[in-house]
Image (spheres, rainbow, N blue to C red):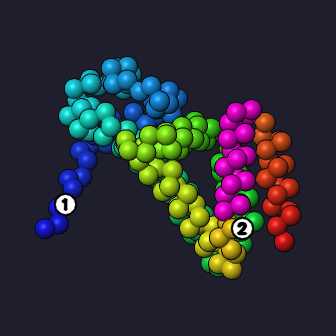
Amino acid sequence: MPTTKEAPSARQQELLERAYSYSLTHGLADLSLRPLASAIGSSPRVLLFLFGSKDGLIRALLARGRADQLELLRQTEQRYDAPPGLTVIARELWTWLAAPERRPLMTFWVEAYGRSLVAPEGPWADFARSTVDDWLELLAASEPGQTAARRTAVLAILRGALIDLLATGDLERTTAAVEDYLAGMH
């Protein structure tokens, strides 16, 4: 018998958004409910009631972060009447990923991705794999004739450059690396 999940209450949604903003600046690795609750105007008990557990809250935060990524993918797909090509989409993605205002989101993503690899049984389960699948799907739609290996290479260069950018702040060098790779893709 199918079950229906109750929609989140306005209060749960409000606290999720506040917790998400908090986690973008404070990360998730050492998330403690007491400081989080205090910072977002709640209590640990309310958070546990609304999200079931700390793991439930982390899962909700990861889903919220992934929703931002999926929205980018949807917007990118909708801009074109026909597949624009892998290099066009890769350049758009890099511009979006590298934007200074997205650094907190991208740091959040890297942290969640890494945690998904080292703690695959916890609330992080399948986060890394799901994001790979999402991005490869977009890259496949951008140029259906490209091989899976080429799409994987583009994804790897974007993610590698992103991690380097987050570590160094060197936008010029990382952008040049992405551009150099994409220029050689003929």
Q: Of the residues under marks 2 and 1, which one precedes in the sequence?
A: 1
Residue placed at 37% from the left, 38% from the top?
58
Q: Callout 2: few (<14), some (14-19), or many (20+) C-alpha neighbours within 10 Å?
A: some
Q: Is residue 105 visible?
A: no
Q: Quadrant of the N terminus?
A: bottom left
Q: Quadrant of the C terminus?
A: bottom right
Q: Nearer the viewer, residue 58 or 84?
A: 58
Residue placed at 26% from the left, 39% from the top?
51
**Image position, residue 64 (x, y; %):** 42, 46
Q: Is residue 29 visible?
A: yes
- Is 15 on the left or on the right of 62, as rendered? left
Residue with the most extreme left position:
1
Q: Amino acid at mark 2?
A: Arg
- Judged from the image, the secondary structure of the residue bearing numbered disc 2 is helix
Q: Nearer the viewer, mark 2 or mark 1?
A: 2
Residue placed at 24% from the left, 52% from the top?
7
Give the distance between the C-alpha atoms of the residues marked 2 and 1, in whole angstroms.
Answer: 40 Å
Residue placed at 70% from the left, 33% from the top?
167
Q: Residue 60's quadrant in the figure? A: top left
For disc 2, the marked residue is: 150
Residue 4's label in the rendered image is 1
Magenta-drawn segment: 152-169
**Image position, residue 47 (x, y; %):** 27, 31
Q: Is residue 44 magenta?
A: no
What's the magenta bit mostly, secondary-structure-wise? helix
